[in-house]
Image (cartoon, rainbow, N blue to C red):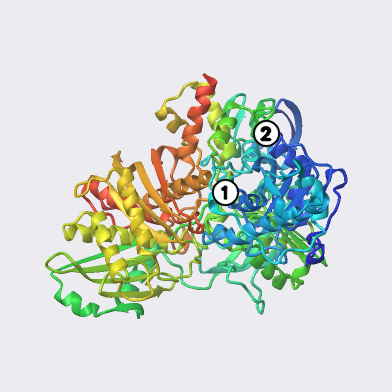
Amino acid sequence: MSRNKPSRRSFLKVSAAAGGGMLLGFSWLTSCENEKARKASPELQMPEKWVTVNAFLKIGDNGVVTIMSPNPEIGQNVKTSMPMLVAEELDVDWKNVVVEQAGLDTDNYQRQLAGGSQSIRHGWEPLRKTGATARYLLLQAAAQQLDVDAASLRTENGVIYHDDSDRKVGYGEVASLAATLPLPEEVTLKDPADFKIIGHATKNVDARKIVTGQPLFGLDLQREGMKYAAIVHPPAFGMKLKSVDDAAVRALPGIHDVVTINAAPEGVELQWSDVNAFPQLVAVVGDNSWRVLDAKKKLNIEWEQTSPPESTADQQESMRLALMDGKAEEARRDGNPEAAFARAATIIDRTYSAPFLPHNTMEPMNFFAHVTDERAELVGPIQTPEFLRKTVSAVLDMPEDNIDIMMTRMGGGFGRRLYGNFGVEAALISRAAGGVPVKLVYSREDDMTQGTYRPEYLVRYRAGLDEEGRLIAFHVRGTGAGESPVFANRYPAGTVDNYLAENISTESNVSTGAWRAPRSNFIAGAEQAFLDEVAEAAGKDPIEFRLELFDRAINDPVGEDNDYDPERYAGVLKLVRDKSGWKTGNDPRGVAAYYCHNSYVAQVLEARLEAGEPRVNEVHCAVDCGIVVNPEGAHNQIEGGIIDGVGHALFGALTFTDGKPDQQNFDTYRLIRHIEAPRAIHTHFVESDTAPTGLGEPSLPPVIGALANAIYRVTGERVYDQPFVQRRELRG
Amino acid sequence: MATFNLTVNGQTRTVEAEPEMPLLWVLRDELGLVGTKYGCGIAACGACTVHVDGAAMRSCSLPVGQIDGQSITTIEGLSADGDHPVQLAWLEHDVPQCGYCQAGQIMSAAALLDGIPNPDDAEIRAGMSGNICRCGTYTRIHAAVKSAAQKLS
């Protein structure tokens, strides 16, 4: 239990906000709460008194409502969409809602994590129940105050009406009483047909702060007496620190200290989130970011080799050998694939590859830490605050209760900030430098060369067709650095009688981690490009070919563990076919469909060539994610995923020479720019009353396949190796 | 260390710094104006874009010693109440995802529209391609620049 959180006992407790100050003390982001809220929503009149209804909710005496957003915000827009769920069932006017970011508080919130596109899926019921419970209590309080039966009351936009006596009371007028009443055993949730907020386009709650440059991000945090720190890690994978001579640096102006830290000391229990190629670091602490970033270049450091240095050619050869000769783990087998291939009239056999990718969030890794003998306070951009606290506790040998963690808005996540080594490092630097409050700042080069990359991958597909062009055998065998990209039970598993999926891992000393839509971000493109070739060999339209397979999965599925709903899958394909005006049999565009993170996406993409490089004109995208909570944010996520996928498929690659990344900044690492972005994206959501699923990831994986297939339609050439642009140039 | 006088968002500010310290870090760490972002440090991503005497510049690569006496506008000073037509267009189109690059995007867009009041699509693409958006909000940025141009004309 940390000091800055309401305890369970304070649940439903009333308190007055003296002078409009803060009640719950969720650290710096909520200090001067009213002032900030006013800036965010200048049209809102702030209340004199707030009532804390529960950990999610404060109601002002004038009816203004503060809703805490529990999950980390990385740009997936949960800070808007999750409070919408609470507000819907509470039945308040969204205009009267102020949203605040909650800190890590495992007593009061569930799953405070940004990952796997799961925030909305997991929050859908609990957050609505939170709002409905508060509404129930407000109704009970109003019934007492008006001396009527609660059943005779109704709510609308934060006001409770007793129509029989033509009386009404605002939520703010009964909130104090409501907060003293017992919780209901159960609450009734709205019929989706009655939703007033869910399903309605709602602007990003932080947009005004973003466009006016107010402090929101970890890098923006400044504290009285705060120092800045920069780290030096080994220049190449397979190396570690041997010795450091810091005499010259200590003498520089503005330099406070030089310390050596170890984020993974022996005997300390680490978490899954502790992926760290370079736990031992040298840190320079000083009074200005530039001074420490500049000074660290002047350190005299010796490194030593701990494992053989790898170059890109070595890594690719390792994967090739693993795929050819490695001991495969059989992940799924249906029928008799070997016999089916033996009798196939046509066999299509193709291999696809993709390189390591850094996440390259625009906001480089950073974290604030203030570690004293008794307590640690950490503030910064982290997708996994709960796991960060566990590791900080273990590494500092300090009880978790003494560690406070506050999440800031993040300048991008894409999976990188699942791995909180930079937070652990900040805590260790603060302690090693004598307990000073310190903000660790990675340079772009530190960020890009530090590891935790999307693994490199290699996958081989084989398909067997009979004389009539029917798919009778399918084999996928994949490998990658530390993991195989193959999902054994995903489509086309379940549609082919004879099916084999195999996994092989390839060793590498380059550290890897989840990167937006892990594994799917590669395998979807490979699979969908391969199926395009199979359809062509079968003499069928690529959409018709896929739909025939789905028919099989709907009517007579093979196996029992098929990890998708073929009707919803086929549904998005049909929707994109219709919306894009697909010309069956001779459409000049590329198509792909994929299911991941519980959502279904199909795309039709039109490409062109510009100065020898593929560009995207237009993408039609059909999405089935169940109920769309916030259409505005949903469209934005789909568009962003498409542009991200196109950009990385065309240009993204991190290569190595002797263990050292060849690209270290945006002059050599090519990210997609405005001029290269698709000209138009049309997103079509399936109308649905199914519970919502995630949107942060699902539009990215298939677009790589749609792009590959569109490139083929334009150039007559199939592309197998990412990035499509660089490899094409290399091949001449 | 030397003393520099800058006009930042209309106010005279005096800073003590090494002449080679980039304007970005003067603004952020010395003056507490953190709206201008660090992205790459080599003028390759545009996150640090500010206006120096009205022109869009990458503050991460601009030593403070080179701009003594000049007038700087940052995102905090682009408008008094966040109501510059470009800022309003960004709100109208709900452009931001993570939001980190958007201050730089907005400063580039405002400078673009100062120079070319009614840019066509190609001019917007060319003018905005120095700013990277890792979230991929380019189609919204494009639409917002067009909206802002219409409001300004």
Question: Are marks 2 and 1 in one subunit?
Answer: no
Mark 1 highlights which residue? Answer: A195
Instruction: Decide: is B128 above or below B97.
Output: above
Distance Cα–Cα, label 2 vs label 1: 38 Å
The quadrant in which residue A472 appears is: bottom left
Question: Callout 1, which amino acid?
Answer: Phe
Badges 2 and 1: C-beta atoms under 8 Å apart?
A: no
Q: Residue furthest front?
A: A164
Residue A489: x and y in percent read 37, 71
Q: Nearer the viewer, residue A97 or A223?
A: A97
Q: Which residue is denoted by mark 2 in the rendering?
A: B76
Give me the residue at 43% from left, 45% from top: A672
Mark drawn on residue A625: none
Q: Residues within 10 Å of mark 2 (few under 14, many from 20)?
A: many
Q: Is residue A622 visible?
A: yes
* Residue A421: image location, x then y, percent: 62, 64
